[in-house]
C-alpha cells in the first residue's frame, strides 16, 4: 500500500478529522474501567486481574509505537490507520468471543495484545502527516489529534456504561457490548482510512515532483544517538509523571485534603473533580500546543515544567486551606500534562525535521510508559507509608508533592540543555549524499 | 512545505466533504463533552 497522495485541490482541513476519527476511537482505552466491575462479577475476577487487558494494552501501545514507527513512516498513514482499525476492532471482537465463552484469556489477548498494537500504531499514524500538512502550525495540528485521544475516554465512558445497562452486565451482555464496540469503532475509524492523504510534495509521495524538506533532517536511528532525544525523553517523562501523580489519586486526594475541614468533599463532588481534570487535560492538549506555535517549543516547556512546579508548591503549602486554590492548581497541572503530550511531536519536528518524525515520536513514547509506572508508584507508595505512620489528610501527600517538584525541576533543566542537533547527525541532502557515495566508492 | 493541494481553495464538493468529516467526529465529541460538563458540575453541587 503506497502512501495516498492528495489530488490537486485537496484540503488540508480534511486531515485533522481523519486523525481525530482514529484518536477518538483508540482513546477508549482510558475508559476500560467501565468494564472492570461487570467482568469481575461475571467471571469471578479480582481487581488486579480485571486490569490486565488495559495494562497489557498500554504496554503494547508503547512497544508497537516504538518498534512500528519506522514501518509507519515507510508505509504511510493509510496503511497505519488500516492496521490500527483492524487490530483495535479485532481486539474487541476477540474479547466478545472471550466473554461469551467465559474465557478471560481471550479478552486479555484480544483487547490487551491485539488491540494494544492498534493503540500504538493508531497513536502515531497521523502525527507525521499532520506536521507535513501544517508546517506553519504543527503544534495546533498535532494538538487536535492528540486531544482526540483524551476525548476518546469522554465518549466511551458514558457510552459503554449505557450499553452495559441496556444489555446487562452478565457475560452475554458484556460480549454483546464488546461486539458493538468493535463494529462501531471499525466504521468510525474507516473515515480516517478513506480521508487521509500525504501532501503532493512530501518525501515518499509517488508520482510527484519531490521537494527537498527544509531544515535539519535526522533519521529515527540517528536520533537515538543524539543528546536532544534523551533530553526530550526526560522532559516528557518528568512532565507526564507529575500529571499522573495528581490524576492517579485525584478523587481520594481531594477527599483527604478537605476531610478535616468545615467543607469536606463528598464522593459525588470528587467524581466531578475528576471529570473537571479530564476537561483540563483535553483543553491543555489543543490550547497549550497551539500556543507553542506562537511562543516556541522550548518556552512552552519552561511554562509546563516551571509553572507546574510552582503549582505543586502552592498545593503543598496552601492547598488544604483553600478549595478553589487546590482545584485551580490541579487543573493547571493537568492542562500542562495534556499540553506536554500534544506539543512533543512539534518539538521533535523542530529538532529532527519531518523526515522520520513519526518514528522518532513513537520511540519517545517509551517515556510515557515509564512515567505510567513511576507516577502512580510514587504517590501510592508514599501515601501508604504515611498512612501506616498514622498520618492523615493533606499530610499523606506532602512528600509526594516535594518529589514531583524535584522531578519537574529535573525536566526543566533537561529542557534548558536542549540545543539544535549537530549537523553530523543530519541526513545528507540528495546532492551531498551522491557526493559522499562517490567519495566512498573512490576510496574503496 | 505548503503545497498546491492545500493552497488552492477546495472545490464545492470538497467543502461538503470537509463539513461531513468534521460533523462525523464533532457529534460524538460533543456528546462526550456534554456528559463531562454534567459530571463536572457535581463538584459544585455534590
Image (tube, rainbow, N blue to C red):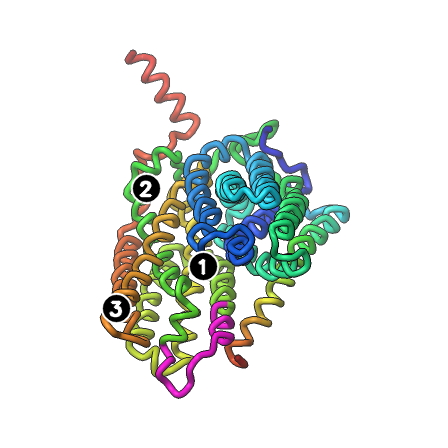
Q: Are marks 2 and 1 on the same chain?
A: yes
Nearer the observer: mark 3 or 1; the answer is 3
Give the secondary structure at mark 1. Answer: helix
For disc 1, the marked residue is: A338
| Residue A276 in the image, given as x and y percentages of width and height | 50, 69
Residue A218 placement: quadrant: top left
How far is disc 2 from disc 3 in space, using C-alphas? 49 Å
Under circle 2, the secondary element is: loop
**Residue B2 in sight from this viewpoint:** no
Measuring from the top left, give residue A266's x and y in whole percent. Answer: 47, 78
> Mark 2 highlights which residue?
A421
Q: Are marks 2 and 3 on the same chain?
A: yes
Calculate the distance from the C-alpha at mark 2 to the C-alpha at mark 1. Answer: 26 Å
Query: Callout 2: residue from which chain?
Result: A
- Mark whose residue sits in front, 2 or 3: 3
Residue A85's mark? none
Viewed as shown, does residue A103 lie left or right of A224? right
Q: Which chain is home to disc 3? A: A
Residue at 50% x, 62% y is: A287
Q: Look at the image and give the residue range highlighted in magenta.
A: A257-274
* Left or right of A256 in this view: A135: right
Q: Residue at x 52, y 79 (%)?
A: B46
Q: Looking at the rendering, which quadrant does residue A225 occupy?
A: top left
Disc 3 is placed on an element classified as: helix
Is A363 magenta? The answer is: no
Residue under pointer 3:
A388
Amino acid at each position: 500500500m503506497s502512501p495516498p497522495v492528495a489530488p490537486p485541490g485537496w484540503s488540508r482541513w480534511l486531515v485533522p478529522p481523519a486523525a481525530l476519527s482514529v484518536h477518538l476511537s483508540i482513546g477508549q482505552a482510558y475508559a476500560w474501567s467501565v468494564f472492570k466491575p461487570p467482568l469481575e462479577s461475571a467471571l469471578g475476577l479480582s481487581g488486579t486481574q480485571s486490569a490486565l487487558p488495559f495494562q497489557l494494552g498500554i504496554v503494547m501501545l508503547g512497544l508497537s509505537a516504538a518498534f512500528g514507527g519506522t514501518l509507519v513512516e515507510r508505509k504511510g498513514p493509510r496503511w497505519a490507520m488500516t492496521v490500527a482499525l483492524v487490530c483495535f476492532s479485532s481486539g474487541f471482537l476477540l474479547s466478545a468471543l472471550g466473554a461469551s465463552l467465559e474465557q478471560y484469556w481471550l479478552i486479555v489477548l484480544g483487547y490487551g495484545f491485539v488491540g494494544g498494537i492498534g493503540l500504538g500504531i493508531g497513536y502515531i499514524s497521523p502525527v507525521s502527516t499532520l506536521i507535513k500538512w501544517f508546517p506553519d502550525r504543527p503544534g495546533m495540528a498535532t494538538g487536535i489529534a492528540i486531544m482526540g485521544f483524551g476525548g476518546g475516554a469522554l465518549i466511551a465512558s458514558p457510552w459503554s456504561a449505557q450499553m452495559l445497562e441496556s444489555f446487562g452486565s452478565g457475560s452475554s451482555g458484556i460480549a454483546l457490548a464488546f461486539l458493538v464496540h468493535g463494529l462501531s469503532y471499525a466504521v468510525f475509524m474507516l473515515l480516517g482510512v478513506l480521508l487521509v492523504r500525504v501532501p503532493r510534495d512530501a518525501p515518499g509521495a509517488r508520482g510527484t515532483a519531490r521537494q527537498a524538506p527544509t531544515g535539519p533532517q535526522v533519521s529515527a536511528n540517528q536520533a537515538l544517538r543524539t543528546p536532544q532525544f534523551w533530553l526530550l525523553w526526560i522532559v516528557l517523562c518528568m512532565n507526564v509523571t507529575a500529571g499522573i501523580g495528581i490524576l492517579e489519586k485525584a478523587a481520594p486526594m481531594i477527599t483527604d485534603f478537605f476531610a478535616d475541614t468545615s467543607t469536606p468533599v463528598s464522593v459525588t463532588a470528587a467524581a466531578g473533580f475528576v471529570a473537571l481534570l479530564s476537561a483540563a487535560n483535553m483543553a491543555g492538549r489543543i490550547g497549550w500546543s497551539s500556543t507553542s506555535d506562537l511562543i516556541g517549543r522550548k518556552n512552552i516547556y519552561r511554562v509546563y515544567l516551571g509553572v507546574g512546579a510552582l503549582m505543586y508548591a502552592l498545593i503543598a503549602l496552601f492547598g488544604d486551606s483553600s478549595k478553589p486554590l487546590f482545584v485551580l492548581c490541579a487543573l493547571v497541572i493537568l492542562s500542562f500534562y495534556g499540553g506536554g503530550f500534544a506539543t512533543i511531536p512539534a518539538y521533535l519536528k523542530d529538532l529532527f525535521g519531518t523526515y522520520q518524525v513519526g518514528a522518532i515520536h513513537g520511540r519517545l513514547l517509551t517515556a510515557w510508559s515509564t512515567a505510567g509506572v513511576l507516577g502512580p508508584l510514587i504517590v501510592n507508595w508514599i501515601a501508604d507509608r504515611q498512612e501506616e505512620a498514622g498520618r492523615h489528610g493533606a499530610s499523606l501527600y506532602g512528600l509526594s508533592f516535594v518529589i514531583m517538584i524535584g522531578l519537574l525541576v529535573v525536566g526543566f533543566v533537561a529542557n534548558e540543555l536542549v540545543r539544535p542537533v549537530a549537523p553530523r547527525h543530519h541526513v545528507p541532502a540528495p546532492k551531498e549524499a551522491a557526493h559522499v557515495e562517490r567519495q566512498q566508492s573512490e576510496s574503496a | 512545505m505548503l503545497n498546491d493541494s492545500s493552497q488552492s481553495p477546495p472545490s464545492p464538493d470538497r467543502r461538503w466533504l470537509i463539513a461531513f468529516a468534521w460533523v462525523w467526529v464533532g457529534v460524538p465529541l460533543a456528546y462526550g463533552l456534554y456528559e463531562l460538563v454534567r459530571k463536572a458540575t457535581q463538584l459544585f453541587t455534590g
